[in-house]
Image (tube, helix red, strand yellow):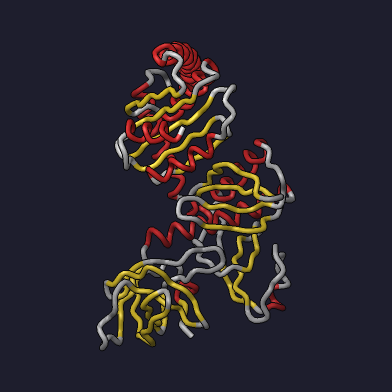
Amino acid sequence: MTKKLYYEDPYLLDFESMVNKVDQDKRGIYVVLEETAFYPTGGGQPHDQGTINGVYVYDVEEVQDEVRHYIEEQLPKDTLQVNGRVDEKRRIDHMQQHCGQHIISAVFEDQFGIPTTSFHLGKDTVTIDLDTDHLSEHTLQQAEARVNQLIFQNEPVETKWVSVEEAQAYPLRKALSVDGDIRLVIIPGIDYNGCGGTHPRSTGEIMAVKFLGWTKNKQQVRLEFVCGYRVLDRLEEKHRILSEVKQLISRPEQQLPEEVNQLIKESKEKDKRLAEMEEHLLQYEAREIISEAENAQVIVRVFKDRMFKTLQSLGKLITEKAPNSYLILISEQQEQLQFVLARGAEIDRNMNEIAKETMPLIEGKGGGKPEFVQGGGPRLLDGAEFAEQIKRIL
């Protein structure tokens, strides 16, 4: 069994150890050491990363009482003793997030009667699932304030190994599911929990907690948050974005939401006017195409880089005004053809059947209603040639 130094001292990041085993499994090459400061994945907390004799350790997992350090390349065959170095930034980050989660869960359960049912420590944010279907803004504000107050109080964070019988003397939040000794993480008067993760010596090292919002997850609420240096990272990101916005909108920060709302409102009004103008232009274009067709049974138009949505709108306007005609509209793109095949209301023919015959010419796909079909495919033919083939079938 590997001796777990991270339980003795979570701040130990540089250590020497003997090699017990070098092997390989489906994850890759791994090393088992006599003792290690590398924390393996477990209890909702991700694994440590770092180096062993300068070789990158990308994963750490505990398998059958041995801690496997998965390394990027093989160590020399005669390697007996190694130096391990744990990535400090990643370790401290995980300690802050995990301990912060303990306090958050304690506050929600003790102050609001809402227990935590699951925990996930992600790369950018942390989430817990809370056994409730709603969190009010008032509850979130109260809970966040209380959590940060407990962090500011710099309460001690203790860990100890006890037997199951000894553990019963503590007000544990969850029933124990093990028979042997259990490791308790204790924040006196705040939280008592069986936990195998790494934690700081005191709550003050968490620095701060910021709730990012919540979403419904099945019948529960999933709360997203960040702790410690991640709060600073988020603040820096928000500050950068805000600074960029202020370069575009010359207003004090407090007035930016109002100004952005006004800009959005004006933009929507302009979009509406543009859509109305485009509709008038398409109606004019439809009349012009019908006029130039001079009552032809098949109306054909081939465009360059015409938007597919515009092609569809134009097709509907033309067929409404030309009930006795077929319509072929094609847009030539750089590497593909897009098409609309349609008929007027006074023609009784399924245009899907025409499409099935012609789409193989461009290895295309498409479909629609009997009177109106659209699709596209690779540009294996020129638009005019593809239109001519369709016209022949019609």
- Residue 290 figure quarter: top left
Position above or below: 284 against 105: above
Residue at image location 37% in from the left, 62% down from the top: 88
Question: Camera-side residue: 19 or 371?
Answer: 371
Question: Camera-side residue: 29 or 214?
Answer: 29
Position above or below: 259 against 120: above
Position above or below: 270 against 166: above
The number of numbered discs placed on residues in the rendered structure image is 0
Residue 125 drawn at (x, y percent): 50, 50
Residue at image location 59% in from the left, 22% down from the top: 346
Asked whether, in this view, residue 145 is left or right of residue 337, the answer is right
Residue 248 drawn at (x, y percent): 35, 22
Question: Camera-side residue: 68 or 309?
Answer: 309
Question: Camera-side residue: 364 or 60?
Answer: 364
Query: Is residue 27 something that shows in the picture?
Result: yes
- Residue 323 figure quarter: top right
Residue at image location 46% in from the left, 45% down from the top: 231
Position above or below: 205 against 212: below
Residue 106 drawn at (x, y percent): 65, 54
Residue 251 drawn at (x, y percent): 41, 18
Residue at image location 59% in from the left, 50% down from the top: 150
Query: Is residue 273 something that shows in the picture?
Result: no
